[in-house]
Image (cartoon, helix red, strand yellow):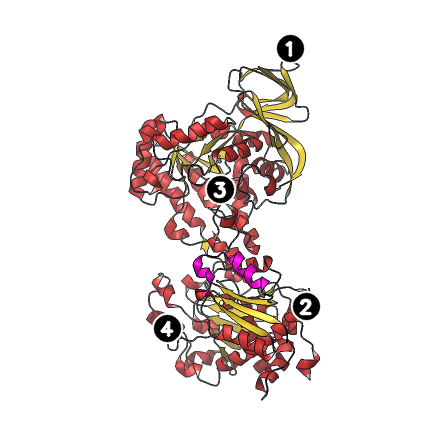
């Protein structure tokens, strides 16, 4: 399937390598725009997008908003906590209401897996999944792929370690689906209670030992650990978690010399990643944020049909 | 009033009958089953090319009345049942109020009597309000016509209460129908825990949530000597526990649903809430084990767990959707199409699982065509091909993952106490 034929972007599970490459390649000139003094291009003038976030977010929501604005689309953020959702309106009715205002594209985040799929089935708007439960976070994975490719030059054949709470992580899943399509060796590492059942059937290698997982790695993607998981009885304490899984500079001795460290943010410094490492030259955590804007610009451009010459000009 | 069902293939597993025969019904009872019975004024039903069976029994139905009439009521549920080929159904007590006293049981029976479509037998609750704390007044429930007790929809989590409930039910020869689910393990799970829950990012319900309770209840059945029936058994491990318990002589029976016999967790992938059911659709390995066990005889009956829901309860986020499948109008066709026609389940065995099987579980007299017995007859058209169209259901619940599927082999006529109640998908 060609990406242009898709109505929605719900996950990387169903995208082909070619489609992902198209998005990443389109993001390259977008990143140049961000660096310009005058950042606005008229490409999506007259188009409207709405972000609807049923879960808290700072970077993803802001990133979509500014991506739309750089492309001259009108962007509106629906603050769910103050909307009629609080009055008990059904999701279907909320979606229809938004659709009738004339938006071309909706960006949705929801704590429940599959909700963007439900929304996409019930609206003529294009839908981008900005994270659904523990299912997928495709734009995060796309920006991760972009960030890796930007430094390494290619994704082909890299060994990528995903570290932390794999069970609840949509970032992990989308990364697994995306990286696998480029022939990467994907390793997941974390405590047994945070490892999803049958994860190896996704084509990854799973580890409990951080040292073993890092052997010869090109990239380490560190996931955020949430305190609620400890309270739910999935591991004994944050201290023990940190002792076992906090990524520190000395761990990287086992990885390749040019190993790259990613983190989707927001970071718990001193819990899943040492502060020293987070601020080191190995980490591209800040660059990931810029790349996130570029990748989202690329997606909005591809999905809302901007004129190509205005980007490359 | 006489009825003559002519020229059908009569299959009555209890009497070892499988031949082209006529069935004569007089005064609402089976009078004779022979070849070439002369009509002599009897109303004739041409059953050539059809399969004539004892009336089908579904011991696991949610009729929703009283309390949830927007999902279903006793009339709409009864219509769905007779169109689906059933002549007896047993309704679960998770209504509002709960069937935990004679008044509610009496109300259900009275409503069913007025509806006058088929036999509706209420099941009382094990505990008051199905709260899992205090035993229901089972003597009263038995006297009011309840044929079993169950807290279906909710497990009795407290092991001592379950023990006492089973022990107490024994006095009235009431089987205990157990919804086996350890809430501590199932939690907020949305689908079967396994590869597909990982792939779809939904919280899983492990097979162990069912199996630890099946094990617990089997042990309690051994302890108390009461009759235990496992509702909607869905995992290979649970099956193995029942198999072993039966071999040890423990009085345990079990049912499986058409959806657990034919659908796997893989289909949850597009987040269609009609695939959400409790227990969840299981793995392909579980489904294969259930199918094997059908022919082997470990499984005592097929039951629908008919769980109609209102559209709004399903037209929403997957996590928020109600669990359940509206099953009465598709059960027979699903089993015929997916299990009988492909040769997985012999036709005679299938009929047993819908007739004498469930009758034995609850000690009902129905389920045979023996001369003198009540003339409840289900006639199947094994060749009819039809699409599942939920919008044409008699049930208020249109929630079915079988929607749009073309199935071969449907109930054709349903006769209750000698009266034709449904024919060719319509209520008469």
Mark 4–mark 2 Cα distance, whole angstroms, equals 44 Å
Judge by depth and name the residue closer to the eye, B114 or A17. B114
Depth check, mark 3 against mark 1: the one in front is: 3
- C-beta proximity under 8 Å, tags 4 and 3: no
Mark 3 lies on a secondary structure that is loop
Q: Which residues are magenta?
A: A83-101
Q: Is residue B63 left or right of residue B98?
A: right
Mark 3–mark 1 Cα distance, whole angstroms, equals 46 Å
Mark 3–mark 2 Cα distance, whole angstroms, equals 42 Å
Residue B411 painted magenta: no
Measuring 67% from the left and 75% from the top, which residue is drawn there?
A306
User: Can see residue B362?
Assistant: no
Chain of residue at mark 2 = A
Seen in the picture, residue A228 relative to B182 is either above or below; the reply is below
Chain of residue at mark 1 = B
Measuring 59% from the left and 80% from the top, which residue is drawn there?
A70
Residue under numbered circle 3: B71
Residue under numbered circle 4: A242
Residue under numbered circle 1: B40
| Image coordinates for residue A175, horizontal then vertical, percent | 54, 69
Q: Residues within 10 Å of mark 2 (few under 14, many from 20)?
A: few
Q: Residues within 10 Å of mark 1 (few under 14, many from 20)?
A: few
- Tag 4 and tag 1 share a subunit: no
Mark 4 lies on a secondary structure that is helix
- Tag 2 and tag 1 share a subunit: no
Residue under numbered circle 2: A4
Mark 2–mark 1 Cα distance, whole angstroms, equals 73 Å
């Amino acid at each position: 399937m060609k990406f242009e034929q898709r109505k929605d972007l719900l996950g990387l599970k169903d995208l082909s390598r070619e489609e992902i490459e198209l998005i990443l390649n389109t993001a390259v000139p977008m990143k140049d725009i961000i660096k310009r003094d005058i950042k606005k291009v008229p490409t999506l003038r007259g188009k409207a997008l709405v972000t609807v976030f049923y879960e808290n977010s700072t970077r993803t929501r802001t990133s979509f908003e500014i991506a739309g604005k750089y492309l001259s689309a009108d962007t509106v953020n629906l603050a769910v906590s103050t909307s009629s959702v609080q009055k008990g309106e059904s999701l279907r009715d909320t979606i229809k209401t938004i659709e009738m205002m004339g938006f071309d594209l909706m960006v949705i985040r929801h704590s429940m897996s599959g909700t963007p799929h439900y929304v996409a089935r019930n609206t003529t708007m294009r839908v981008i999944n900005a994270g659904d439960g523990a299912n997928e976070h495709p734009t995060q994975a796309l920006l991760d792929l972009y960030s890796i490719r930007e430094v390494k030059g290619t994704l082909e054949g890299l060994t990528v370690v995903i570290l932390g709470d794999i069970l609840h992580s949509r970032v992990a899943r989308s990364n697994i689906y995306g990286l696998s399509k480029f022939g990467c060796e994907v390793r997941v590492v974390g405590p047994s209670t945070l490892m999803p059942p049958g994860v190896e059937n996704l084509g990854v290698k799973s580890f409990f030992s951080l040292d073993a997982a890092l052997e010869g790695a090109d990239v380490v993607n560190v996931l955020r650990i949430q305190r609620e998981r400890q309270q739910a009885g999935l591991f004994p304490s944050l201290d023990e978690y940190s002792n076992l899984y906090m990524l520190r500079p000395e761990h990287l001795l086992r990885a390749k010399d040019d190993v790259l460290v990613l983190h989707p943010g927001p970071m718990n410094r001193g819990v899943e990643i040492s502060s020293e490492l987070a601020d080191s030259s190995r980490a591209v955590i800040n660059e990931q944020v810029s790349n996130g804007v570029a990748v989202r610009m690329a997606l909005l451009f591809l999905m809302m049909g901007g004129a190509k010459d205005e980007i490359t000009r | 009033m006489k009825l003559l069902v002519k020229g059908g293939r009569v299959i009555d597993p209890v009497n070892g009958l499988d031949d082209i025969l006529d069935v004569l019904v007089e005064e609402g009872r089976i009078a004779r089953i022979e070849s070439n019975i002369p009509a002599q004024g009897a109303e004739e039903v041409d059953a050539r090319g059809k399969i004539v069976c004892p009336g089908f029994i579904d011991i696991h139905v949610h009729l929703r009345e009283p309390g949830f009439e927007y999902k279903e009521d006793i009339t709409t549920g009864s219509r769905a049942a007779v169109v689906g080929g059933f002549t007896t159904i047993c309704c679960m007590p998770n209504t509002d109020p709960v069937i935990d006293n004679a008044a509610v049981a009496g109300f259900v029976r009275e409503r069913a009597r007025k509806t006058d479509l088929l036999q509706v037998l209420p099941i009382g609750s094990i505990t008051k309000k199905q709260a899992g704390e205090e035993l229901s007044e089972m003597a009263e429930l038995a006297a009011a016509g309840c044929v079993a007790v169950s807290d279906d929809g909710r497990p009795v989590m407290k092991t001592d209460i379950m023990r006492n409930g089973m022990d107490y039910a024994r006095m009235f020869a009431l089987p205990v129908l157990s919804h086996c689910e350890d809430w501590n393990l199932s939690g907020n799970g949305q689908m079967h825990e396994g590869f597909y829950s990982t792939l779809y990012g939904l919280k899983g319900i492990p097979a162990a949530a069912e199996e630890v309770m099946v094990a617990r209840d089997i042990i309690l059945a051994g302890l108390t000597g009461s009759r235990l029936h496992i509702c909607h058994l869905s995992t290979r491990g649970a099956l193995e526990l029942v198999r072993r318990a039966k071999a040890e002589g423990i009085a345990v029976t079990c049912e499986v649903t058409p959806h657990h016999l034919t659908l796997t967790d893989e289909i949850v992938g597009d987040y269609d809430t009609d695939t959400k059911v409790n227990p969840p659709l299981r793995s392909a390995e579980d489904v294969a084990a259930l199918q094997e066990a059908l022919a082997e005889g470990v499984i005592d009956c097929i039951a629908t767990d008919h769980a109609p829901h209102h559209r709004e309860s399903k037209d929403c986020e997957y996590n928020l959707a109600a669990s359940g499948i509206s099953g009465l109008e598709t059960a027979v066709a699903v089993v015929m199409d997916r299990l009988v026609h492909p040769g997985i389940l012999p036709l005679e065995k299938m009929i047993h699982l819908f007739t004498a099987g469930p009758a034995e579980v609850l000690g009902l007299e129905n389920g045979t065509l023996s001369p003198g017995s009540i003339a409840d007859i289900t006639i199947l058209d094994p060749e009819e091909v039809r699409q599942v169209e939920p919008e044409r259901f008699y049930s208020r619940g249109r929630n079915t993952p079988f929607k749009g599927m073309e199935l071969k082999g449907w109930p054709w006529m349903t006769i209750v106490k000698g009266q034709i109640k449904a024919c060719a998908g319509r209520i008469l």
